[in-house]
Each structure stands twice: as structure tokens, then as C-alpha cells.
Image (cartoon, rainbow, N blue to C red):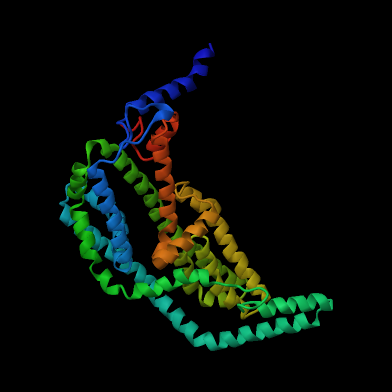
Amino acid sequence: MDEPAELAPEDAAQRAARWAASLPPPPFVDPSGAGEHRRFTPLSPRVAVLIGAGILLAILLLMAQDSVRPFIIGLLFVYLLDPPVRWLARHGVRRSLAILLVYVGAILVVGELLWLTIAPLINEMLRFIADFPTLAADLDKQVQKLSEIYAKLDIPPAIRECIDEILAGIGQPGGTISIDLSFLMPVLTGAGSLIGLLFGYLILPVWVAYLLNDRVALVGQFDRALPASWRFDVWAVIRTIERVFGQWVRGQLILGFAVGVFTFAGLLVASTLVDPIFGRYAILLSVIAGVLELIPIIGPIISAVPAVLLAATVGPGTVVAALVLYTLVQQVENNFLVPKIQGDSVELHPSLVMFAIIIGGSLAGLLGAILALPMTAAFRDVVSYLFRRLSPDDPAGLVISLSNIGMGPDDG
């Protein structure tokens, strides 16, 4: 009676193999080969022309990367605004009118958020500027107190001398230990370059509106331009990239808002229980935390620095409270929010994330650092799909890759 149940996994594997065999053959692969003897076909003149054009286009985009950045952000806006436009179009609203309605709704929502936050934020920024001399003096007093406490400690001379050398070497290139933060400069200096692109961003609403209005026609033209033998795999790669970027965009918006709200609530609690300094700049610090959430790993660390410095003007206890608060917020985000919101689509090892951020920041400044995570995750998934597509001995893996993007055997 139990034998049919034991055959179920084998039946599933056989179904996966039959379905994978029914797919169009992958392009650039000799169909006469089989198994491990598969070979790539020689490049046709058409393919060589396309590869050359792609390389030339990549070089031109790299040379004009400062001018391209606004349009990259515009593509993100297209992705965010297209779902409500499509929903209205499906319900009988003309597409141009649907775009206008979505624009008006987005402007109202953003305007309301700015109305609620911009005035308090500006007030706190002006308050911080006015308080800066006092804060600097308080911080200097706390440093002097720590120096006095350190001078009174009963420490063996050899250890004290070693500690003094370490402290003297901090921040000095020729010192024993030097904290070199130059690796962050490509990320931070990119923020200044964005200011010079304000005029480029002024045309974004019009450009985005054109793409939203003609999206269906453009997609159709692109599909018809593809060779029939390429169509399946090209759309599989595009949907793989869309899946990663889709979950990343939605996740970052929700995570940034959630981190900002949690930080604001935590600062208000700390203002009541620890010291009023936390509540005095709660909105400013929470906005910084929400915005820097765009940069994984490094962003949350940088966002904690202003709060720790402000806490240091009061005393060591407030510093500990600030560290505990920001650590708690990050633990809630990493252990509860990220798995629920982003899933594993952009999950990468922290060492790889940091490497990607530095490379992205070096190549494209702040925007490159922000987009480094989804681009690296998309590259990983595309390579995984292509590897499985060219591996006839792993049909189950190919089924998994295609099912994740809605092109599997059960997706019709």
C-alpha cells in the first residue's frame, strides 16, 4: 500500500525532466550535442553585431554616467507608478488619464508627508545649528572628564604607554593604528554630485509619463524584435531581474519608513527615560536613519553616529542608551522585517554586500552604492538561471528558477 507514495518523488523528477525537455532549445547551443557534450555554436554575424553594439552602448553609458543617473531613478519611478496605472487601465480608465490620476495622487501623498515632516525637520535642523557650539563644548567637557578618569586609573606603565601610543595614532596616517575612512568617500561625495544634476531631474516627470503611456507598445516592439530562438530566455532573464528589483524597491520603501518610525519612537522613549537630548532632535535623527537605510550594513552604522555623538555630550550612560537603541532597531529589522518583506531574493553574505557597496560607490557614487545590492543579487540569480538552463542533468533546479518568476510548469 505504501509503494505508490515512495514513487512520488521519482514521478515529480520525471515530470520536471519532461517539461524541461519541452522548452525551446537555449540559444547559442548546438542542438546536436547532448549531455556533457553540448557545445556553443559559432557566433553569427547578427549576434556579433549585437554584442559589439552592446559593448559600445555600455562604454557610452559609462562615459556619461553622471547624465544617466536621473534616468535610472526615473526607471525606478516607472516601476513604482506602473502597477496603479495598469490597475486603472484594466478598469476602463484611459491610460493617459490613469497616468494623470496617479501623478496627482502621488503628488498629494508626497505633499502631505512633506507637510507633516518638513516644518518640524527644518526646525530641528535650525535648532541643531544654533546649539552646535554648546554641544561641541559639552562634548569637549565629557572628553576631558574621561581623560581625567583615565589618568587616575591604576594601570601598569607599560600598558599605559601602549594605550597612549594607540590613542595618539588614531586618525594619523603615520600612527600605530589609523582609522582610514577614505573607502567611504566615493559613497559620501556622490551625494554632492547629485546636487549638480537638479536640472536633469526636472525633466523626469515628463520622461516617466512617456514611458508609462507607451509601455505596452514599447514592450510589444521589443518582443517582436527578438529572434524566436531568443525570446524565452530573454524574457526569463528580464523577469528574474524584475523580481529582484521589485522586491528590493518595495522592501526598501517599507524598511526605510519602518526604521524611521521605530527610531523616532525609540528616541521619544529614551528622551523620557534617559535624557531629553534624544527627543530634542528625534525627527532629524529618525529621518537620517530612514534615508541611510538605503545603504545596507554601512548605512545603519553611519546613521547611529550622530545619535552617539549627541549622547556623548551628556555622558557615558546616554551613549550606552543610544547604542542599545540603534542596535535594537537593527535587530528588529534584520530578524523580523527583512525576512518578511524582502525574503531571500536579495539575501547576500555581508562580506559580499560590503564589497559590492564599495565597488558600486567607486563606479557611480551614492547611487551606485545604493543599487549595488539589487544589481549583485540580480547578477547572482541570472547566472544561476543560465547555469541551470545549460545543465540538462538538473531539470528540477531549472523548474525552481522559472517557477520563481512565473514561468514554471504550473504557471500556464
Give the mark count: 0
Of the pair 137 and 235, the residue shown nearer to us: 235
* Residue 234 in picture, x, y percent from top left: 30, 42
- Which quadrant of the structure image shows residue 17? top left
Q: Is residue 147 above or below residue 178?
A: below
Q: Please determine whether, in this image, residue 198 is positioned above or below residue 61.
A: below
Task: Name the one closer to the observer, 385 or 219.
Answer: 385
In the picture provided, is 310 more to the left or to the right than 73?
Answer: right
Q: Residue at x 53, y 51 (%)?
A: 349
- From the viewer's side, name the closer residue of 243 and 371: 371
Considering the image in quadrants, where does the C terminus appear? Answer: top left
The residue positioned 40% from the left and 54% from the top of the image is 375
- Residue 14 lies, with reference to residue 60, above or below; the image says above
Whole-percent x, y for residue 48 in the image: 26, 46
x then y, percent, for residue 297: 52, 60
Furthest residue toward top: 1
- Residue at the spot 51% in from the left edge and 76% down from the top edge: 281
Position of residue 235 relative to residue 358, above or below, is above
- Left or right: 53 as drawn, with respect to 390: left
Residue at the location (43% across, 76% down)? 121
Q: Can residue 374 be spotted in the picture?
A: yes
> Could you say where residue 43 lies in the image, as x and y percent from the top left?
28, 41
